[in-house]
Image (cartoon, rainbow, N blue to C red):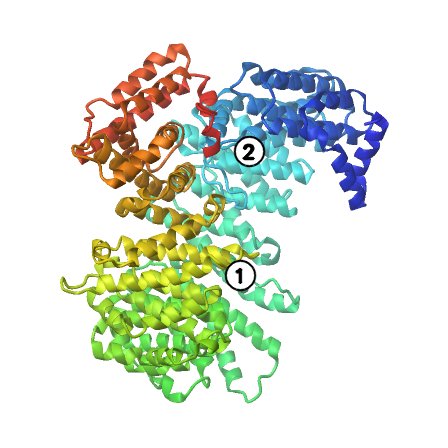
Amino acid sequence: MESLAQLELLCEKLYNSRDSAERAHAESTLKCFSENSDYISQCQYILDNASTPYALMLASSSLLNQVNDRSLSLQLRLDIRNYVINYLATRGPKLQTFVIKSLIQLVCRITKFGWFDDDKFRDIVKEAADFLSLASQDHYFIGLKILYHLVGEMNQANAMPLTLHRKIACSFKDQFLLQIFQISLTSLHQLKSEVPDDFRRDPLSLALRCLSYDFVGCPVDESSEEFGTVQLPASWRPLLQDPSTVQIFFDYYKVNDTCVSKEALECLVRLASVRRSIFVEDPARTQFLSHLMSGTKEILQTGQGLADHGNYHEFCRLLGRFKVNFQLSELLSIEFYGEWIGLVAEFTTKSLLSWQWASNSVYYLLSLWSRLVTSVPYLKGDTPSMLDETVPKITEGFITSRINSVQASFANDSSDDTLDNVDVLQEQLESLPYLCRFQYQNSSIYIINIMEPLLQAYTERSRLPAPGDANELSVIEGQLTWLVHIIAAVLKIRQTIGCSQESQELIDAELAARVLQLINVTDTGVHAQQLYARLSELLGLNDHLVLLNVIVGKIATNLKCYAECEDVIDHTLSLFLELASGYMTGKLLLFHIIPVTFLVLERETFPFLEEYRCARSRTTFYYILGCLVFMEDTPVKFRSFMEPLLQVAVNLEATADAAFRTDVVKYAFIGLMRDLRGIAMATNSRRTYGLLFDWLYPSRMPLLLKAISLCADEPEVTTPLLKFMCEFVLNKAQRLTFDSSSPNGILLFREVSKLIVAYGSRILLLPNGTDIYGSKYKGIWISLAVLSRALCGNYVNFGVFELYGDRALADALDISLKMSLSVPLSDILAFKKLSKAFYGYIEVLFSNHITFVLNLDTNTFVHIVSTLESGLKGLDTGISTQCASAIDSLAAFYFNNITAADGPPSPAALNLARHIGEFPTLFPQILKTLFEIIIFEDAGNQWSLSRPILSLIMLSEQMFSNLRAQILASQPVDQQQRLSQCFDKLMADVARNLEPKNRDKFTQNLTTFRHDFRLSLWTSAQYCRYAMGIGGSQSSHY
């Protein structure tokens, strides 16, 4: 760099130029400052001498990148930290805001990364407090900003191991967070009247960040507004019991600046969410509640600030928290409860009428009222809750607002319709059923009085020869749609508040009859009259079969008329499945409503079955039909049911190979596979599975082999085929149980082997495309799942294959292993489904076919075992358990056949000994990894992890002694004796065998060991240095 002026010019171009090429050139020229530690001194020179803020920004951001690499020495990090603190103190007031922010972020990042390396890093809180004591107002706000960013930095994981982050965050919380919150409160009191409104936001933001801290290690979902209970430590109790703590935030709410008032409400929302147990005595909790209610009552009376949407939304959230953390009886104990509840009811009613403006806020208000009414049965005493007067008005207000919203949406030509958004619709209706059933009689009359005129108008419009005004008809349909959703939500909830069970059932019938009447109107004329001949009896009969027939008729209508709407088809099939899954409703459907003959004939008239975009729904549809057919469990009816599928299969078998890749043939085959998969899912017994097996084998199996051979490069064909086989070979509920003289299990595996070999041998030859998961990995993981299920299904004696020279097993294992090894480990870990299938397959190999693994060459064997270690380090508990099981199988084989073997070793044992001889660190490294997980991770599968740990310890006492010595040597001298006792207890009463009783004893000891060891580490500041690397590999596994 020739001169500082030239650098400043480049920085100007980097941050301000609109020319992308110019910015790219500047970035390429200046990146050396971020990547090379030799330029750190030059960054300091820039900070000392540059005159433009963009050059200062470059120096600060470059230093931050250097720190993020975590390769700087301890002394250098301390020097940078001290320099930046002094720089902010001397030149901070003159710097641009974005430069100050970057420098503060730098010093906070250094502080966090060095938290356990040197106590000097922890002086930052004291140094920030020193800024507050300086006479300059600018220094005061720099100090607040340092604390604000420090709390945020400590609460964010960044690019460090999660466990290390939690230890630092907890240490910071225990030592400094309360002190920082007290500083924010003190600043709020001091700045209450001394500074302009916009300056008051800094201490308020600091207080909010403190209250939003992750106190228990469960980070908040940033995409959600819900955060549960704030778990403040007990040491914060005096602050909460001080009335001025709550009052200061209500005072700041009255500030004219809406940003300040909104953050004040956010702080109050979190205070209202503090855990109940922090108040040891009821009077303290009551006093705290009284302050909250008093403050909200004043806001409700004056309406101050509620014209701002942000304030309005946060205030609704605050009201919603009252019944989350406090009981109704506690609310009633406040002397001004009656006035408060009346104001909240009035506010809710006005909010419901302003649905366009407050649609996202009403949810919290309705949630409050629903929790209040559900608490009434548990209320003791005679104090009136006043809910009888307020709740019906709120219920009517909500229903009216939804009805009016339809007209308003059409008048404003709004494209944002709540009825089109399932999630928002369910959210709005979540609380309504409880409100309706609180005064069910009145609520139902109100709904019926609204619905009757709409039904009459809709019926009259349906009889007109011409449709008339389309907008008017759309409004009526929208209003009826809202009423149907409301009635459905109410009928789904069973609650006996306010009236008896019998009277509620009568009201349920009244509401349901209106919906059924609407179904009659909407479906009239859509189909042949005979389809709905029984519907005419609806109003004259009280027969459950008639009601069921109406529901089934509606299901048939949707499936026939809405093939172009996937959502309608999916919801309809969900309802159909729910009916078919019930024992009584399933029997009624089969014997009284839709017999098998109807299913065979009628399914051909459902257009959605021919829609390729609804192909996934075919599986669900045939699963439902299969459930119904198998209720009778008769071969004759099953064959009759399968006749249409047989015709499709026969036609496909007769298709020439050259024509098999045409769209018509492919779609027919894909549909057949999806249909068969659904039927296979419905076979839950030995007899029903046998019916399907006999239908498929041997006649239909060549068709599957033909398809996978001709279309191996077309995932749209192979995926449905492989998924069908994945279901077909699954031995759920012991359905694959054949007679002792039956060869069906062996025959089935031979067919599986043919398919896997045919697919694998072809897919491995294909080049990698842009969508490698869709083109290759998906088929590979399904193939591995098919083979894993077949290998562990317990219906094949695999020794038969080798005994009679049958290559089916060997070929399947060979090609599956080649497919597995063709996928890089990084890709295996990146794709969740692939990862689960791969490790499930490896677990089966090590458990049931370990000889095959041991006969591999050493490099391949070591690679596979290394992938198991990587799986252990992952975050998925299921995969970690599979890896632990595989390692346990391997170590147990070594112990039983080599370490504790009586006779000469088998060829497989000799191979294992050779592998370990070439890579002697293999087992010690895995044992170390397992101990690291047990000690440092909060593993939910500790029982599973204990199994391989014992097996590995049994292999070699020397290996365990070396690891023990390595761990103890990394600890302070004063801790080593105590930790050595932990290891002694670990092996207490543990014999040198792998019997189940001995394993259970070791698992108990391991639990005690983990507790005692972690307790000792908590007392040592060396904990995180140890976590960063006894042996250097720890950081890679978080």
Query: Where does the image place residue 526, in percent across and percent down from the top left?
Result: 46, 84
**Marker count (numbered):** 2
Decide if residue 101 is in sight here: no
Q: Are marks 2 and 1 in contact (CB under 8 Å)?
A: no
Kindly identify the amino acid type of the residue bearing the numbered disc 1: Asn
Q: Nearer the viewer, residue 986 or 198?
A: 986
Quarter placement of the N terminus: top right
* Residue identified by numbered label 2: 159
Left or right of 819? Residue 47 is right
Query: Where does the image place residue 76, in percent across and percent down from the top left?
Result: 63, 17
Q: For mark 1, give the secondary structure.
A: loop
Is 251 placed above or below 828 here? above
Q: Which quarter of the figure has residue 769?
A: bottom right
* Residue identified by numbered label 1: 421
In the rendered image, the residue lying farthest to the top is: 974
Q: CA gap, disc 2 to disc 1?
A: 37 Å
Choose mark 2 or mark 1, whichever is in front. 2
Q: Nearer the viewer, residue 302 or 928?
A: 928
Kindly identify the amino acid type of the residue bearing the numbered disc 2: Ala
The residue shown at (25%, 55%) is 793
Q: Nearer the viewer, residue 252 or 918?
A: 918
Q: How would you rate the neighbour count of disc 1 (Cα within 10 Å): few for under 14, some for 14-19, many for 20 or more?
A: few
Query: Where does the image place residue 355, in percent across and percent down from the top left?
Result: 58, 57
Decide if residue 168 is in sight here: yes
Q: Nearer the viewer, residue 128 or 344?
A: 128
Q: For mark 2, give the secondary structure.
A: loop
The residue shown at (28%, 77%) is 545
